[in-house]
Image (cartoon, rainbow, N blue to C red):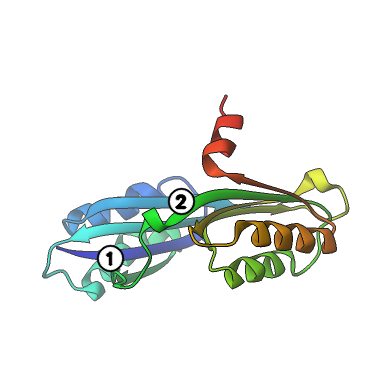
Amino acid sequence: MQKFVISILGQDRPGIIARATRAMFQQQCNIENISQTIVQTEFSGIFIVSAPPDLRTETLQAALVEETASLGLYVYVKPLIEPKDSPSFKEREPFVITTEGPDRMGLITEMTSLMASYQVNVTNLKAVFKGGDNPRENHTIYEVDIPVGTNKKALDRDLREKAGELGLEISIQHRNIFEAIHRI
């Protein structure tokens, strides 16, 4: 069994997921993972599917494009290649880093560049910037995996220092603690 990554982008409207998944089903693909969201008025979906060994990338892409043509979507299909040297999930700890503060260009670049210097992997990112200086209207949530051997005190210090330089309030919590605190 082979796997594909399918990305679909376009103006949001009802029926996108129904049509895209119909095309996947008709090509005998099994959906393993979906990450889908609406950003302002734009639909963004990423699907990981397992597929029959003889299904070609071009065939799956053509089926998706045909099924969704009237919706004006952008569809991209590529084979999923499993990395051979990626660290296992056991070697990483999940954390949630949140920031609030005035909007300005480069916030995400500066924060993620610092994280990357510590080999921190951003696994999910949500940012809402409405401009201005009201910190309640500008926030970012980074879900990250931190390698177990990382000097967490140094990372914490450097993140707080960078946030201070950018005028941001920052919170850094292990994901288990974050979820326990934010449970309804």
Q: Is residue 89 left or right of residue 105?
A: left
Q: Where in the figure is residue 34, as x and y percent of width and height? A: 38, 51
- Left or right of 70 on screen, residue 173: right
Closer to the camera in the image, 83 or 64: 83
93 lies above or below 81: above
Q: Quick one: 66 or 153, which is closer to the camera? A: 153
Question: Residue 172: image x %, image y %?
Answer: 66, 48
Image position of 24 (left or right of 106) = left
Relative to residue 162, is residue 127 depicted above or below?
above
- Name the residue type under label 1: Phe
> In the orientation shown, which residue stands out farthest toward the top?
184
- Tally the marks: 2
C-alpha distance separating marks 1 and 2: 16 Å
Quadrant location of the C terminus in the rendered image? top right
In this rendering, is residue 176 above or below 64? Answer: above
In front here: 182 or 103? 182
Q: Quadrant location of the N terminus?
A: bottom left
Q: Which residue is mark 1?
A: 4
Q: Residue at x 66, y 69 (%)?
A: 114
Residue 142: image quadrant is bottom right
Q: Residue at x 24, y 67 (%)?
A: 60
- Crowdedness of circle 2 by 10 Å Cα count: few (<14), some, many (20+)? some
Residue 5 position in % (x across, y down): 33, 65
Furthest toward the right, the residue is 133
| Residue that numbered label 2 is attached to | 36
Q: Position of residue 53 (x, y in %)?
A: 12, 67
Q: Is residue 42 visible?
A: no
Q: Amino acid at mark 2?
A: Gln
Which element type, helix, strand or loop, lies under badge 2? strand
**Residue 87 in sight:** yes
